[in-house]
Every structure is written in C-alpha cells, then in structure tokens.
Image: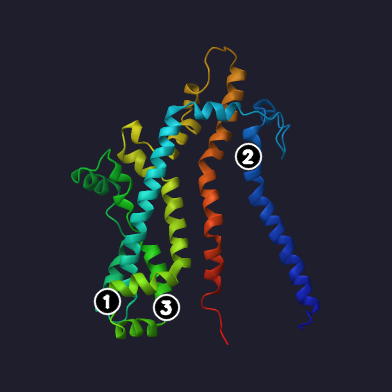
Amino acid sequence: MLVESRGDRIFNVINHFLLIIITLIVIYPLVFVLSASFSDPQAVLRGEMFLWPKGINLHSYEKIFQNKDILRGYTNTLIYTSVGTLINLVMTILAAYPLSRKDFIGRNAIMALFVFTMFFSGGLIPTYMLIKNLGMLNTFWVMIIPNAVSIWNIIIMRTFFQQSIPNELHEAATIDGCSNIQTLTRIILPLSMPIIAVTILFYAVGHWNAFFNAMLYLSDKDKFPLQLILREILIQGQTNDMVKMSTESAIKQQREVEGIKYAVLVVANIPVLLLYPFLQRYFVKGVMIGAIKG
C-alpha cells in the first residue's frame, strides 16, 4: 500500500477543490436554464429564481409544441443529423483505414493533401458558386454533402488504427484468407468501437448545432433545421409569432417571450445530452486502450 506524502495530499486537496469549482461553473447554467423554463417568467425577470424553479408551469412548453415551425425544424434536424452522421462515419472509416495500412502505397502523399485542405480552402464565395453549380441550393443534400467528412476526424481515426490495432491482426487475417473489406468489417471495426463512438458523437453534435450552411444555402423555411429556427426566435425577435397578441401589455408579452427562450434552449439541447450516456462506456474503454499491460 502506497503512503501519500504531505505534498501529494496537498496537491489532491487543491485538485479536488478546483475540479469542484469547475464542475459547479459548468453545471449551474444548465440547471438555471432548465429551472427557468419551468418557472414563472416574471420571477425569472425579477431575479427571484436562483436555482430551483419558482412558480412552476408548462406554459412556455405549450407555446413551443403549438408552433409548427419548431416541430418541422426538429424533424429536419433529426433527419440531417441521422443521415449526415451515417455518411460521415462511413466516409471517415473508408479514408482512415487505408491510410493507416503500411502496405498502402502513397498514403503519406495523400495524407499531406488531406491536411493541406485543413489550412487552405477556396473561400466562401467559390464554395457558394460550387454548391450552386452542383444544383444543391435549397435541397436536403446541401446540409449533408459539403460536410461529408472531417479531416481532423480522419486523422484521429487513422492514428487509432495505427496505434491500437496490432499489425499481427492484419497478417493473421490475410493468412486466413480475408480480403481487405472482410478484415475491416470483421476484425478492425469490432475492435474500434471507442473511436467510432467518439466520432459519432463529434459528427452528431456538429450536425445538431449546424445553422451557418442552412443560413447560406437554404431559402425554403420548410427545410430549415432547428438551430436556424431558434436563431430567428432568440436573435431576430420572431417570438411574436408564438405569443398571443390579444394582450396589449408589453410587460406580459416580455414575460412570455422570456419563458419561451429558456424552453427552446432546453428542447434544443436535450437530445444531445441524452446521447452521451449511451456512448459513455466507450469513452471509458477508450481511455484504457494503449495502457501498459504486464
């Protein structure tokens, strides 16, 4: 049994203290937004609500789910995220696996070209003209194809394949008569669930939060993703469409708008927060890969 020195104990105390402070800083805004969405907007505006809901009501959520634009945006984002993440994952694996093989001729030159695109691009206007010439403006695919692969994720997955998959497995598979595709699907991918889970999370969060491409390339509101709808609500002041205009009181309207803002933030972030627990075990497993084995 190891005996901690005085310096180690002091370090652990300071480390735990800092981690607790950082955790509280991260958690408090989440708890506040969630509580504010269920609270009386007037209590929130007056600063009477600190952590727990005050004057609990579901009025803001009723307003949200009565709004067709938000429901349509939610559906669009789910489609963009699921289809986009699937394409991203397939493209990343198909690029990273060959580049990780030592017997793949020219892999370093190809990797250099990939890395070059991380630092230099054609620019916004040429990209827009390319999208227009391809006929993808205001289509479903404009939210999928331009971001079909991330070079950074290719590098991460390629590094994982190189460092965590022994070369002896490739040799054994070849001796057993496996083709490259069979080696990938039957041996490499089942052993690569941690990096696949991380990649799925990165791509899914990216698609879920995407709004810039939609703002540039989409003009049909029926194709807008959720984040673009929320942007209009939170920034452009379009919550008036969701608030009953029968009242002439500006104060009451402001209260309703305030409640809706917090509610839409909760609705927009819940799916991503629910995704992480299902992938958490792969993150933990990924930490152990590469550890010293006796």
- Which badge, 1 or 3, is on the more N-terminal residue? 3
Disc number lying in front (2 or 1): 1
In the picture as drawn, the residue positioned furthest to the bottom comes out as: 294
Q: Residue at x 32, y 81 (%)?
A: 102
Tell me where residue 212 appears, x and y as whole percent.
Answer: 38, 43
The quarter of the rendered structure image containing the N terminus is: bottom right
Location of mark 2 (residue): 34
Location of mark 1 (residue): 179
Mark 2: amino acid: Leu
Figure check: 185 above or below 130: below
Disc number lying in front (1 or 3): 1
Verify CB contact (< 8 Å) between mark 1 and mark 3: no
In the picture as drawn, the residue positioned furthest to the right comes out as: 6
- Which badge, 2 or 1, is on the more N-terminal residue? 2
Q: Residue at x 53, y 35 (%)?
A: 264
Q: Residue at x 43, y 52 (%)?
A: 204
Mark 1: amino acid: Ser
Rounded to the nearest angstrom, the CA distance separating label 2 from label 3 is: 43 Å
Figure check: 69 above or below 124: above
